[in-house]
Image (cartoon, rainbow, N blue to C red):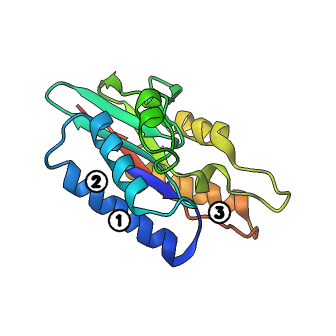
Amino acid sequence: AVGDVSGKGISAAFYMTLTKGFLRSLTRTVDPPARVMSEINRLFWENVDRNHFISMIYGVFDMQARTLTFVRAGHNPILHLREQTCTALTPGGLALGLERGELFDRILEEKTVPLRPGDLFAFYTDGFTEARNHRQEEFGEERLAQLLMENDGASAEQLLSVFKKQMQAFIGHGLQHDDMTMVLVRITE
């Protein structure tokens, strides 16, 4: 799971910690990602003030079935790199805490992707795509996808190093106002 809470400071950190606890608890007893996300939304709605929401992606890699099954609650797409082609995976979904549950459940779409050796999945927060340089240009999803394609054979660790260098070169001395989180998963066999 990768998520991003609205707002800054202690309250935002508290709400993310609370949501992480919901996720850990629910994944022990609830199976499909859509049900897990639906329950997290219900708990978030019941326990958090209306001024906050969380975008999140939650998925399960099943290495026996060779699939990734995931849901996206208002979060950035997963970038999926396969054979030099980068695809944004964008099933429907509202951010957590925006709605009690009926609309949330109706819009939430669970997606399953078959896994192949060499596949790479990039889960990230908008701190990457919304990072700005001194001209106030955003790094953007296209640059992120281009970096993935240009470094297709690299390991996840090597890619993170490339991203760090490219991000520092792009940002330069520009001030950033958001954290950056990225999880890369490479399917090796």
Residue tagged 3 = 168
x 14%, y 49%: residue:
28
- Marks 1/3 in contact by CB < 8 Å: the verdict is no
* Callout 2 crowding tier (Cα within 10 Å): few <14, some 14–19, many ≥20: some
Q: Is residue 177 left or right of residue 1?
A: right
Question: Where's residue 25, x and y in %?
Answer: 20, 56
Nearer the observer: mark 1 or 3; the answer is: 1
Q: Using the rendered image of the protein, determine whether residue 153 is visible from the camera's viewpoint.
A: no
Amino acid at pointer 3: Gln
- Work out whether residue 64 can be spotted: yes
Q: Is residue 32 above or below residue 95?
A: above
**Which residue is tagged 1?**
18
Q: Within 10 Å of the Cα at label 3, are there few (<14), some (14-19), or many (20+) other Cα atoms? A: few
Of 174 and 22, the residue lying toward us: 22
Q: Picture coordinates of residue 172 (x, y %)?
A: 74, 65
Q: Position of residue 176 (x, y in %)?
A: 68, 67
Residue assigned mark 2: 23
